Each structure stands twice: as structure tokens, then as C-alpha cells.
Amino acid sequence: MDKNSIIVSSLSKRFSFPVKDPSAGWLRNIFLPRTKEVKAVDDITFSVQAGERVAFIGPNGAGKSTTIKMLTGILFPTSGKASVLGLDPSKERKQLAYKIGTVFGQRSQLFPNLPLTDSLEFFGVMYDLSAKEVKTRIAELVRTFELADFIHQPVRKLSLGQRMRAEIAASLIHRPEIIFLDEPTIGLDVVAKKSLRDLLLKINKEEKTTIFLTSHDVGDIESLCERTIIINHGVLVKDLPTRELARSFVRQKNIDVTPETAFEEFPELPPGMHYVLRDRNKLTIAVDINSITVQEALRRILDIFKVDDIDVYDTELETIIRNIYESHSTRN
Amino acid sequence: MKAIRPGIKLIRTLVRDRIYYPGRLVVDTATMVARCGVLLLLYSYVFRLNGGTISNTTFTIAAWSMFFYFSFSILRLRDLSQAIMRDVQSGNVEVLLNKPMSYLAYRMWWQLGAGLYQFGLISVLGALVLAFSIGLPATMSAAVFLPTMIAVVGLGILLSLSLYAVVGLLAFWVEDITPIYWIVDKAVMLLGGSYLPVALFPAFMYKIALWSPFGASQFITHTVYPTWAGEWPLKLGIQAMWVVLCAGLATLLFLSAKQKVSVNGG
């Protein structure tokens, strides 16, 4: 990891679109419509090194997909600069296309009515591979992505999990240096998600492909990405190693308490502690560690309840991410 | 060669697919028989009522002219507009925009490939049926016929693709291009000679058919007329002019459309 694959500097994208003005006449609404401007991405700066696995996350409408589309040359930035593998995506889109792969989880680049093999062969030709190279690469991808069972089936007849594996295989036909994935696991079951994550890790390890991924699935981030960039309202909020995400933003510990005999009463807790779950056979208490230490919280719990077992654990990454989104929304 | 290799691959893939799955061929053959066959039966009756000739045109010439129109329409180049509109409306255009092949070229090659097999097969079979049933007009045995017909088909394909691409690309500005598509398509049908052979047009309408891109895209229907031998340089020139203008306009629109891309989630 010694060179930058992606360099983004003060990148912004604004969309403007006409909005109907109920107070104006229809003629004015057609010819002189009122326009509304939305800042989809607002002055973001970051870089990604070759071979990194980066999660680019944020709530709906945060600007994730817009950023990916600017980095792949689909959308043109309003201001700022982006450089992907030394190329300007908005000006050198075609040259860049040979070096990157893209997968949009909610869209398909494959021919729906034709066998998968036709799509793979076509992509090979489109990326200027020779007939021999196409054949060899398809054989590699079929082996890696276990496509053999369905490679001759029309794409529309594949399951979602099979299709996503095929989509990623197709985007890797030309051995891109970076693969951009926009919500690749959306709609997949847990088995298919794990299989896809394992495949991406394998590609990253074996072919040194940089992975730049957006997802709402915490599992994708935890198991796949070593670094997480958080964006909200078009603004870059956090950029840090994924393992530090939990460490840096844990403001809350959870304590599960199992009673000696069933709980009868649920007395008021000291400040900094509150019930998450109140059940006769189990309590879950959240502790704000900025207000009260875990040691003090445990002591208080033991004073109040007769306890058979106790378990202290960190807040899940999903909750941490939600807290980051919410705290940023509040600040806005 | 490098630039057209993906296009040729696309055409080969689609032709192979249509051979494996002949459903489309059956549908297109049935459409051809229904539309062209019924019209020709009606026209044969009308020509008989007029003693076999109308406005110095024999039924054989009118029938071949109309057959050429319907045969050309099997290429379904008009579907290009709808395909572009669907891509824009669904947002699927984004997965095709970041490929090393131009989106517009991809869609044009696709459209050509999707209809080529049916076009080739039905045209040959239809021509044989027509040749054995009503015979060939003398104009088709002229030396100039075959080379100029190949040229007029080639230019007609380019013009149709460019014309329907212009209509389809308007989807980047107006969400639903169906009304525009409907007007253009009906203009092509009318001025191309699908309802009435061009030779029977009143003078003013013939002029419109001659000088508009809609009529020019269907000049294949003019190739069987006795006047073709003297008019083909002008008509090929008109076609070439419209190809340049429409392809230029489509390119400009596409360049502008790329700047306008705005799809769901970005």
C-alpha cells in the first residue's frame, strides 16, 4: 500500500431541478419554473491507497452513491477535483473504464435474457481482451466465483445471490485495479452475503484489487473493510480504521443481568443508566460511560438486585454508526 | 476495427440467441404476413379494379415497394427510442455509462443485432414468395438495382438509428418521449410508404417524403420504381445528408445528456 488509488479534493456536487410553484400559473411553471438546488456532496476530501478496502457509508441521501458516480465518471462534479488511478473521471472516463470495475447492487449490467456466459464474453471483448484472454479469464472467474452450475442459464433465471456473484465476476473480467461496489449485498440472505464478502476478500488478497464499497449492512463493513469513511448530508463526518470506530465512539456499554430469582420490581436507576430491557428473567441496562464508570454501574446494580449472572458488552457497531449519523444530523 | 469489435460481438451474440430461441422469428413472420399480406391482397384488388395500373405504376412494383418497407421494419430500429427511454427512466443508463464503449454505440449495435436474423431470413423467404407469386418487376433486373439497394439499405439503417436515437435521447429532458416517438414513427410509416406506395403520393406529399428524414430513411421503397435509375444519386445524397445531420444532432444531444445524468441515489 504505497500509492494513492483515489484522491478526492474539495469535491462537491449540486443538483438543481424544477419544482412546481402552486401560486404560479401553469405557463410559468412550464417555461419559467422555480428551481431547487440540492447539495448532494459538499466539499469532501479524502484519499484511498492501492489495495485498501474502504467502506463509504452514510444514511439514505447522504451522498454516497453520488460520490461513487463522480469517481467512476458517470456524474460530473460541480466543483473540486477527483483523481482515480491518476485519471480525471469526468475528462478521461473511457481510459478510466479500463482500470476500474463497478457493481451497482440495485442495477444489472448483464444481459437479462441471454446466458451469463454471453455477458462475460461480451465484457471481455469490450475491454479489448483477446479471444484467448477472454477464455482464460472466464475460466478463472468461474472457478473463483463458482459460476459453473449456472453459467449457461439466462441471467433473468438466476437467484439474487447468483446474480450478484455474476455481476462482480463480470466487473472483474478485465482485472481492474479498483472495484466500486454500491450496496452489493442489498437483498441477499445471510449465506449469500457471507459468500460474497469472502469472495471480495479473496479478490483483494489475490489480485490486490482496491475495494471501495457503500453499504447499509454493518456486516459488510465489519467483515470486509479495514477503513470506514462516514458521510452525512454530503459532508464527510468521519474517516478512520473500522476497528477504531467502535473504540472511539463507544459512549455506551450494555449490561445484561440474570436474576437469582425472578425480578419483581424495577427501581429507578442512577443517572447515566437506563433500562433497555425489563423482563422478570432478564434485564438489559445501558450505561453512559461519560456519566458513570462501568465499575460504579456494576456496584450500583449489585446493590439493587440479587444477581445470578452478569454480562458487560460493547454497543453493536450498527448502534454506533446510527449514533454518529444522529449526532451529525442534530448538529445540522 | 478495434472500435467495432464489441459491436460485431454483440451482433453475433444476439443473432446466435435468436437462432436458439426462434420465438421472435415466429412473431415477426406472423406480423409480416398479417400486415403486409393483408395490404397486398387489398391493393391487388384495387389495382385489378383499375385495369392493373394506377398512375403508371403496376401492382408488381407497388407490391415490391411495400414489401421492402415491411421487410426493413423487421429490423425494429424504431425500438431504439424506447430502449433509451427505459434506460433513462429506470436509471439503468448509469451501468452502461462507465464502460469503455459509448452508450449510444452500444444501444445502436444492440438494436441492429436484435433484428438482423429475423430481417435476413424473413426478407429472403418473403422475396421468394413474392417472386414466385407475382414475379419480379423489370427494374429489379437493372444493373444499378442491387448495388444501389445495398447502399440505400445501409444509409437507411444509419439514418433510422440516428433519427430514433435523437428521439430516445430527448428522454434526458422530457421524461416520457412516447408522444414524440409516436409522431416520428407515424411520419416514417406514412412517408415511407407503408399505407400507400410512394409512387401514388400526391406531388406535395412526394416532395415531403423526398426531402424529410422520415421519408429518406425508407428510400428502399423507391428502388423498384422505373425512375430509380435516374434518381438514385440524388436520393442517396439526400440520405447521406440526413445521416450526417441526424448523427451529428444525436452526438450533440448525447454529449449534453451525459452532463445532465441524474439517477436515483445520485
Image (cartoon, rainbow, N blue to C red):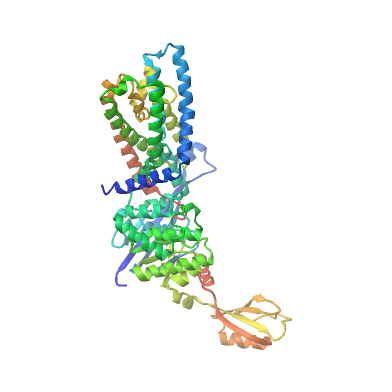
Identify whether A186 is placed above or below B135: below
Q: Residue at x 54, y 76 (%)?
A: A315
Residue A323: x and y in percent read 53, 70
* Front position in the image: B92 or B145: B145
Identity of the residue furthest to the right in this view: A264
Identity of the residue furthest to the top in this view: B51
Q: Residue at x 33, y 50 (%)?
A: B101
Residue A90 in sight in this render:
no
Q: Is residue A191 left or right of residue A148?
A: right
Q: Using the rendered view, name the quadrant where residue B162 is placed.
A: top left
Identify whether A145 is placed above or below A247: above
Residue B104: x and y in percent read 36, 45
Identify whether A150 is placed above or below A260: above
* Front position in the image: A321 or B26: B26
Residue A198: x and y in percent read 44, 69
* Front position in the image: B217 or B114: B114
Q: Using the rendered view, name the quadrant where residue B249 is placed.
A: top left
Residue A161 in sight in this render:
yes
Residue B48: x and y in percent read 45, 14
* Front position in the image: B108 or A166: A166
Q: Is residue B115 left or right of residue A218?
A: left
Identify whether A38 is placed above or below A179: above
Q: Is residue A152 left or right of residue B249?
A: right
Q: Name the quadrant of the C terminus of chain B.
A: bottom left
